[in-house]
Amino acid sequence: MELLVGWVILAVLIGWWASQWGRGAGRWFLLAVIFSPLVAGIALLVVGVSNPKRPCPVCGTAVPVGVTICASCGYDYVIAAKGGEQTLRT
Ligand SMILES: [Zn+2]
């Protein structure tokens, strides 16, 4: 029983970690539950390092690192860093 609880807690952590990297939390949580949190963690690390993404602060879309404008809403990281006005597509 304790193993099952620990398994689910680790899977939740994987899901949270995935969301921090702009990945679908639910998808990674399921992956961790079905396979194992260890396998999902390693897979997330490999995917995250080879193709890093960050969540858009406006719409939550995963934006690849190096891309400065969100493809979904038009949020501009460069303008945001300078504190300028954003013209967003909503
Ligand atoms: Zn966006």
Image (cartoon, rainbow, N blue to C red):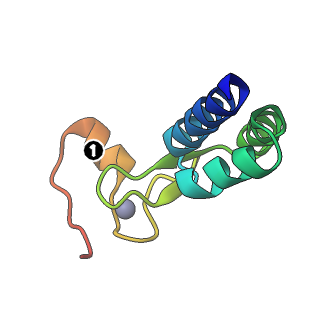
Tag 1, which secondary structure?
A: helix
Q: Image quadrant of residue 85?
A: bottom left
Query: Residue at position x 72%, y 26% from top?
Result: 3
- Residue 53 vs residue 77: left or right? right
Q: Foreground residue, 76 or 47?
A: 47
Whereabouts is ligand 1, in terms of quadrant?
bottom left
How far across and how far down the image is residue 75, in percent? Answer: 33, 59
Q: Foreground residue, 31 or 72?
A: 31
In the rendered image, which residue does mark 1 sit on? 80
Count how many numbered circles sit on residues in the image: 1
Amino acid type for the residue under numbered disc 1: Ala
Query: Residue at position x 47%, y 52% from top?
Result: 68
Residue 71 position (above or below residue 2): below
Circle 1 packing at 10 Å, graded few (<14), some (14-19), many (20+), is: few
Q: Quadrant of the C terminus?
A: bottom left
- Residue 35 vs residue 58: left or right? right
- Mark yes or no: residue 24 visible: no
Q: Foreground residue, 45 or 79?
A: 45
Residue 35 position (above or below residue 7): below
- Residue 81 vs residue 1: left or right? left
Q: Image quadrant of residue 37?
A: top right
